[in-house]
Image (cartoon, grey):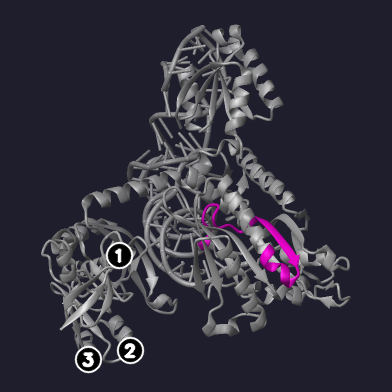
RNA sequence: GCUGUUGUAGCUCAGGGGUAGAGCACUUCCUUGGUAAGGAAGAGGUCGAGAGUUCAAUUCUCUUCAACAGCUCCA
């Protein structure tokens, strides 16, 4: 008996019935077989040792496949558990899944106190056990036997997990002296794991439930080569260097003060230059795209948010109401849309007016839980580059396409080359969670999917990720270190026009309801700035740099000449300063480099006499002498958005 | 909000039951210099805040605030 195996390249090979993926790999090349971690058979990831009994498509998974990595890390979690059990007998185990980079295991150490000082010992134990090359052995087991095993072991967490499992579908995996309840799959043996690092320790509630016991979560990462671990640690170091909180302080972009309040950023002058430039850049693009600027106050009557539905849904996440002597209640504005709806309502609208696009860099305030606050990425007061488009149903797709263009233009201008779009739809199993009619949801979802497809966006679709009022398209960018960030968002909303009773008069002289589109290419200026800082490591594109040049006079004698240069550059809207300190040129250069100022203009005796400047570029060094005109034209060429 | 860790000069950090230290930054002076740190002197701290133990607390205990990591959440 033979079976036909289809490989990813489309080739079909014949194997005896019951052949395993590992055998298939061996038949292709020994080198491949050495690297196979698991296999994807007809789309399901399975052990490489699983016999295949029917015609199937088989993809062999190695370290280079996402699923291969996940299997590797999940198997590593078992190994970590084995190491823990051998070092700290009596440890109880919760769950140990693979995550984006690495894996964790939630464990209950009982009386044992485990802290960072134990990491090294644990890592050594993991590697010691890995070297034994123990096979991961799969075993199907009855629920009764499984319960018996963990009752005897006294592991209440595994028993809790077993409760939710169906008899007949329960499997154990054993490697070395450790047996775990696990669906699998796993890598062939522990010998693949050549490097291990325990990264972090944290608390986590059993099953994510605050009322349950808190377990110790151990984060770790493993690799098939020592070199890969080293590279990974270097990457982490680089990420640390780029941390926007650190660079924000060093480059004097923003700060926080306990006296002002947590989560409330204070923009310093240099940060404000950056921020204003981002705002002006987008304003200009939006003007071209037919947006109109509007402005609304920082607080709004409670009635407004009751009308919008946000009060009911998010009232608890707001700051406390502000009370007036007349016993009215006001809230700090948590979003701009209700205000924009009222602007729309300020006069009767005709279909000829649509689409109307109101844009506002509106600062909003939300009560974020204290533990959530993080630098500029999660704050309690932030400015959205918000806009609301009011249009007819038939215009939704067209508007959506235009917004996508705008978002992509922004990304390109700021150097985000790598992005994907996430289409967030309703959870079909839980439609009650959302407000609005089925019909409208279907239409909106269709519009988004089509628009994304027409623009050729690289998309992923997530069910259940939609906002409660409508589906959305979120843009995720990958930064220079390969980390993913969610930035821009475009959301269709049929509900708010309904709640605010928005209308327009159609060509038929009847009243119709417009559709709203919320969109923000940056998301929030705070968050965007944070991502931008980390993306470019503080080396902003020239047009955004808070200080574009610094003039470095060789000595005090050339300060007047320096000033004349500075004034000439300012005439051209090029912004910078003069380093008038009583320091040597080497020192001034060093400090300018550290401050990441793009151009250093050295002026001394020679320059003053020849009426030139000597240009030095950050990171690159001396570009030689030139006259001011050449510098300005070079600058303008490079500063183009 | 929950759990854990941390909180000493503007920044990075050392120290420790007897009222405090380094480097960088800052101020002044010397130096007037040519491509990544010139020299000297000086100033700067209720040791996050409040309470308790003690002859004595910045150090020990408790409470509180904040930061960090994670969990839960995110219009």
Q: Residue at x 53, y 49 (%)?
A: A530
**Tag 3 residue:** A142
Label ID, residue A9: 1
Q: Earlier in the sequence, mark 2 or mark 1?
A: 1
Q: Earlier in the sequence, mark 1 or mark 3?
A: 1
Q: Residue at x 62, y 28 (%)?
A: A576
Label ID, residue A163: 2
Disc 2/disc 3 C-alpha distance (Å)? 13 Å
The residues colored magenta run: A372-398
What chain is tagged by disc 3? A
What chain is tagged by disc 1? A
Q: Nearer the viewer, mark 2 or mark 1?
A: 1
Q: Residue at x 17, y 64 (%)?
A: A28
- Provide residue A628's location: percent of width, then percent of height: 62, 18
Image: A551 above or below B47: above
Residue nearest the observer in this picture, A435 or A262: A435
């Amino acid at each position: 008996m033979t079976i036909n195996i289809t490989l990813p390249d489309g080739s079909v090979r014949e194997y005896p019935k019951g052949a395993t993926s590992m055998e298939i790999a061996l038949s292709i090349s020994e080198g491949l077989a050495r690297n196979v971690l698991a296999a994807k058979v007809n789309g399901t990831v399975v052990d490489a040792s699983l016999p295949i009994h029917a015609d199937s498509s088989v993809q062999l998974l190695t370290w280079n496949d996402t699923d291969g990595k996940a299997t590797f890390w999940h198997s590593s979690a078992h190994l970590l558990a084995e190491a823990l059990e051998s070092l700290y007998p009596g440890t109880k185990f919760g769950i140990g899944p693979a995550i984006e980079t690495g894996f964790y295991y939630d464990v209950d150490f009982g009386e044992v106190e485990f802290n960072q000082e134990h990491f090294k010992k644990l890592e050594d134990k993991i590697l010691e056990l890995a070297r034994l090359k123990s096979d991961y052995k799969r075993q199907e087991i009855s629920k009764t036997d499984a319960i018996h095993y963990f009752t005897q072991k006294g592991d209440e967490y595994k028993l809790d997990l077993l409760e939710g499992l169906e008899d007949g579908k329960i499997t154990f995996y054993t490697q070395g002296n450790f047996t775990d309840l696990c669906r699998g799959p796993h890598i062939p043996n522990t010998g693949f794991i050549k490097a291990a690092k325990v990264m972090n320790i944290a608390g986590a509630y059993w099953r994510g439930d605050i009322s349950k016991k808190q377990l110790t979560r151990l984060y770790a990462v493993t690799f098939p080569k020592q070199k890969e671990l080293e590279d990974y640690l270097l990457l982490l170091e680089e990420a640390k260097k780029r941390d926007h909180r650190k660079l924000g302080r060093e480059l004097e972009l923003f700060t926080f003060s306990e006296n002002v309040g947590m989560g409330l950023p204070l923009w310093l002058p240099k940060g404000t230059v950056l921020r204003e430039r981002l705002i002006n850049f987008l304003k200009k693009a939006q003007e071209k795209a037919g947006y109109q600027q509007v402005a609304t106050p920082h607080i709004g009557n409670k009635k407004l948010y009751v009308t919008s539905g946000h009060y009911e849904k998010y009232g608890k996440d707001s700051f406390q109401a502000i009370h007036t002597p007349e016993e009215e209640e006001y809230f700090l504005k948590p979003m701009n849309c209700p205000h924009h709806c009222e602007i729309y309502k300020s006069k009767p609208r005709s279909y000829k007016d649509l689409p109307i696009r109101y844009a506002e860099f509106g600062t909003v305030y939300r009560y974020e839980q204290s533990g959530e606050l993080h630098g500029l990425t999660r704050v309690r007061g932030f400015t959205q580059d918000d806009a609301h488009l009011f249009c007819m149903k038939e215009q939704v797709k067209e508007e959506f396409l235009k917004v996508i263009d705008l978002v992509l233009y922004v990304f390109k201008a700021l150097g985000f080359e790598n992005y994907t779009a996430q289409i967030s739809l309703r959870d079909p199993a839980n439609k009650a969670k959302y407000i609005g009619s089925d019909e409208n949801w279907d239409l909106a979802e269709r519009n988004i999917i089509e628009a994304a497809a027409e623009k050729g966006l690289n998309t992923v679709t997530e069910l259940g990720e939609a906002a409660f009022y409508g589906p959305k398209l979120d843009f995720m960018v990958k930064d220079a270190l390969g980390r993913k960030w969610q930035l821009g968002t475009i959301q269709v909303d049929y509900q708010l026009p309904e709640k605010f009773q928005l209308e327009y008069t159609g060509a038929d002289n009847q009243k119709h309801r417009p559709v709203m589109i919320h969109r923000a290419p940056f998301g929030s200026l705070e968050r965007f700035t944070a991502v931008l800082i980390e993306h470019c490591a503080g080396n902003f594109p020239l047009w955004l740099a808070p200080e574009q040049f610094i003039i470095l006079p060789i000595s005090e004698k050339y300060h007047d000449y320096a000033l004349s240069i500075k004034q000439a550059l300012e005439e051209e809207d090029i912004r910078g300063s003069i380093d008038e300190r009583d320091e040597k040129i080497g020192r001034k250069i060093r400090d300018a480099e550290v401050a990441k100022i793009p151009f250093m203009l050295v002026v001394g005796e020679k320059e003053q006499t020849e009426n030139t400047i000597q240009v030095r570029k950050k990171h690159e060094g001396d570009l030689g002498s030139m006259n001011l005109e050449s510098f300005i034209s070079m600058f303008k060429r490079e500063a183009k958005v």
